[in-house]
Image (spheres, rainbow, N blue to C red):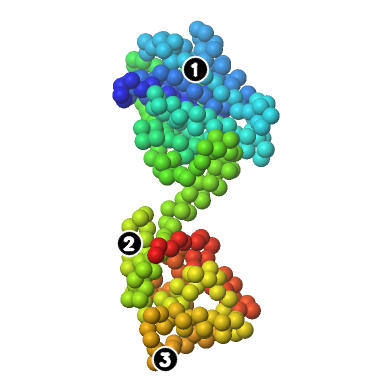
Amino acid sequence: MNDTRKNIFVTVAGSTPQIITESLYDFIVQQKKRIDEIHIITTLHGRRRCEEMIKAYPGGRFYTFCQEYGLNPMDMPISIHVITDENDHALEDIRDARDNESAANFIDGKIQELCAREDVTLLASLSGGRKTMSAYMAYAMQMYGRRRDRLYHVLVSPPELEFSRDFFYPPSGDRDVLVKSAGGEVTVSARDIVITNAEIPFIRINDFLDFDENLNVASYLDKVELTQKSLDNVYRARLDFSEMEKGDLRVIWQDDIKWTVHMKRAEITLYKYIYDLKTLHNSPELNPRHVRELQRIYKGGREAVDSYPDFSHKGISDFRAKINKTLRDQIKNKYILGYIEIASVRTRPYAIYTIGGEAGEQSVQT
């Protein structure tokens, strides 16, 4: 199956289309990879620069590269994708925040489209274009890249070649290259030229995202927010109070009981009360109501209780500190703790307690 997949080289590009032939040189000549399609994401300004290299037949640098190394340019069809705004107008360049947003949406959508093709493997490069274009390329690969897709940055040495507009690829054989630099013309021996597509490891999160079918119409910003929410849910824990009479709280993560936290009866009583109540307003005025409910829960199925814990306004505050210490002593994952600790969401004029705080609510298994 892997042998039948096409290798797609996709890159962002700007005023330096050299990165295309430099990358192709490493992939095809040095790594012996087959490139079946070339996709270039750029602006109108970048397209003109790329077309000088690609469409100027037979003297364009892409064609001379193919001729130099015995390649058939027809085997590598090139598609230039010009970034457009929300009105489908092509961008001359990325000059302001609005253009930047359009670039984000366009690059994101194009990479999503290419990664949806099951018959291809993406070899993506972030070497060209503006820095924001490179950043969006990297993020899009994180969003949609599959296990087989790769991300690269092309490195060229010696330094005189990296910033030269005259250099596009090393010549075959032992020939010298004459390039212009800030200090004048420089001659570089082909033996000294090193070009490498350095692979950039990236985290592939597409399998973990909780997106619905409407994702394909969301903007880049929408996707970032949805991604963050999905990542926040990775550490969402559930609580099981079924062994509460024994003083045991079970913390469930990824459908497995990961921790059994033992508390004193008074502590788990308050914890369950806050859990059921969602928010506990620890004010002196409301304390009598809290005391009645906490004593009822504390008694449970027992016929009589000799004495009750101190569930006063101050007592609740003290128990909250003890509960959180117990949780921290037994659970070392700070993200899990963010969902199960008793947080204070307000302190004046009195504290308001909730389990999880801003981390979100938990679901209970009984």
Residues at discs 3 and 2 in contact (Cβ within 8 Å): no
Q: Secondary structure at mark 2?
A: strand
Q: Earlier in the sequence, mark 3 or mark 2?
A: 2
Say which quadrant the N terminus sits in.
Answer: top left
Q: Looking at the picture, does residue 12 appear above or below residue 256?
A: above
Instruction: Residue 190 in the image: state x and y as whole percent.
Output: 37, 21
Instruction: Residue 88 in the image: state x and y as whole percent.
Output: 66, 27
Q: Residues within 10 Å of mark 2 (few under 14, many from 20)?
A: few
For residue 307, the mark is 3
Q: Residue 158: which quarter of the image?
A: top left
Q: Earlier in the sequence, mark 1 or mark 2?
A: 1
Q: Secondary structure at mark 3?
A: loop
Q: How far is disc 3 from disc 1 in space, using C-alphas?
A: 82 Å
The residue most toward the top is 58
Q: Amino acid at mark 1?
A: Ile
Q: Amino acid at mark 3?
A: Ser
Q: Secondary structure at mark 1?
A: strand
For the question of whether residue 119 can be seen, the reply is yes
Q: How far is disc 3 from disc 2 in space, using C-alphas?
A: 34 Å
Instruction: Residue 45 in the image: state x and y as whole percent.
Output: 62, 24
Q: Is residue 262 left or right of residue 153?
A: left
The residue most toward the bottom is 306
Residue hosting label 1:
78
Q: What's the residue at 56%, 82% (across, down)?
A: 289
| 204 vs 361, nearest the viewer | 361
Q: Looking at the picture, does residue 206 appear above or below residue 76?
A: below
Instruction: Residue 102 in the image: state x and y as whole percent.
Output: 63, 34
Residue hosting label 2:
258
For the question of whether residue 170 can be seen, the reply is no
